[in-house]
Structures are given as structure tokens and as C-alpha cells.
Amino acid sequence: GHAAMAKYFGWGPSRIVFWGLGGVAINRRPLHRSPKKDMAVSLAGPAVNIVLAIVAGAVLFGTQGAFATGTLFGEFWRLMFSLNIFWAVFNLLPIFPMDGGQTLQSALELRFKSKAKVARYTGITGIVTIIVALFLAVGPLRLLGAGIFTVILALYFIYLNYQLIQSKGRPMQWY
């Protein structure tokens, strides 16, 4: 979604890199870019997740009725539905450098002229969101056995958001 939207805006081809936390579309966008176009590129990824979830849900419902998962086929489509909903919601959290954080940053660029203020507000919002999410998720994460990985991921995102605050709006490469 990100790569297709960037290409639509004439930013040229994107390189898609898969790494431990999923994937990232890398594009050498113009230096003088529009925050509105940046928002569209950021939101294109979760939009694709939502479309895929709708398709998976429709296939599952149409072939198995009421999301029943008695077969390998049904389980595949149930996982496709669940994972795409999860990734859409997770990526829309206002945590830099995720899509929600980049969308927030672009929206703040429309409001404030100071890049330092935009970086500070985006970074602080990201750190607060991470802390609140951890407090809300501690019990369920223990039950799912994902606690230590989630804490490490949260610390990594806190570090990235702290770096964003320290950058004072200067361009930074986080990947």
C-alpha cells in the first residue's frame, strides 16, 4: 500500500525490506513534500490490511458460515482476517515510526511551522501511548506468553520516539 501510493504521487519506485518486525517500504521521497501526501502514504498500509481483512472475512463467512473454523482452509482465512485487523489497529497507534505516528507527525506539520515542536509532540505522544498500552496489556500479555517480546519492542519504540524528540525535527533514518 505504501509503495503503490508513493508511486502514484510520482516519488518513484520503493524498496520493500522485510526484517524482524515485519516490513518497511523505503522510498526516497522529495525533500519538499506535502504533509497531506505523507499522510496518504502512511495510511495506505493499514488501508490494505483492512481490505485484506474484509476479503478474508467474506471468504470465510461465504464458505464456512459465521466464521466457523473446522478445516485448514477455514483456519487460514480466520488467521488472515485476525492478523490483518490486528496489524491495521497496531500500525495506526500514534507511535513513531509506525503508520499512526507518521500520520500524526504529518498532521502536526500542517498545524505547526516548527519542525522541533512537531518532533517533540510526536515523540511525547508516542512514548505516552506506549506506556498506556503496556499498562492496559500487561495481564493479557502474560496470559499469551508474549510479555518479554512486547516489553523489548516497547523499549525499542520508546528509544525511537526519544531519538525523534532529540532530533529537533532534523531528518532521521530509523531503519
Image (tube, rainbow, N blue to C red):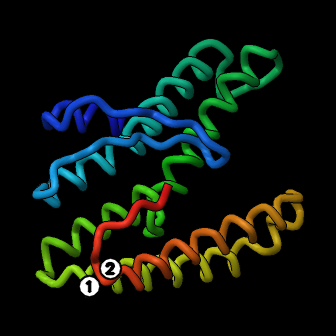
Mark 2: few/some/many CA within 10 Å (<14, 14-19, 20+): many
Question: Residue at 56% across / 39% down in the picture?
Answer: 84
What is the CA distance from the residue labelled 1 to the residue labelled 2? 5 Å
Question: Residue at 47% across / 69% down in the picture?
Answer: 95
Q: Is residue 44 above or below residue 107?
A: above
Q: Position of residue 26 (x, y in %)?
A: 38, 42
Amino acid found under the numbered disc labelled 1: Ala
The residue under label 2 is 119
Q: Is residue 140 above or below residue 34?
A: below
Question: Residue at 24% across / 55% down in the picture?
Answer: 39
- Residue 35 location, quadrant: bottom left
The reply, left or right, for residue 142 in relation to residue 111 is right
Placement of the N terminus among the 4 image quadrants: top left
What number is the disc on residue 139?
none
Q: Secondary structure at mark 1?
A: helix
Check if mark 1's residue and mark 2's residue have beta carbons within 8 Å: yes
Q: Position of residue 87 (x, y in %)?
A: 55, 47
The one nearer the camera, 124 or 69, is 124
Q: Position of residue 172 (x, y in %)?
A: 37, 66
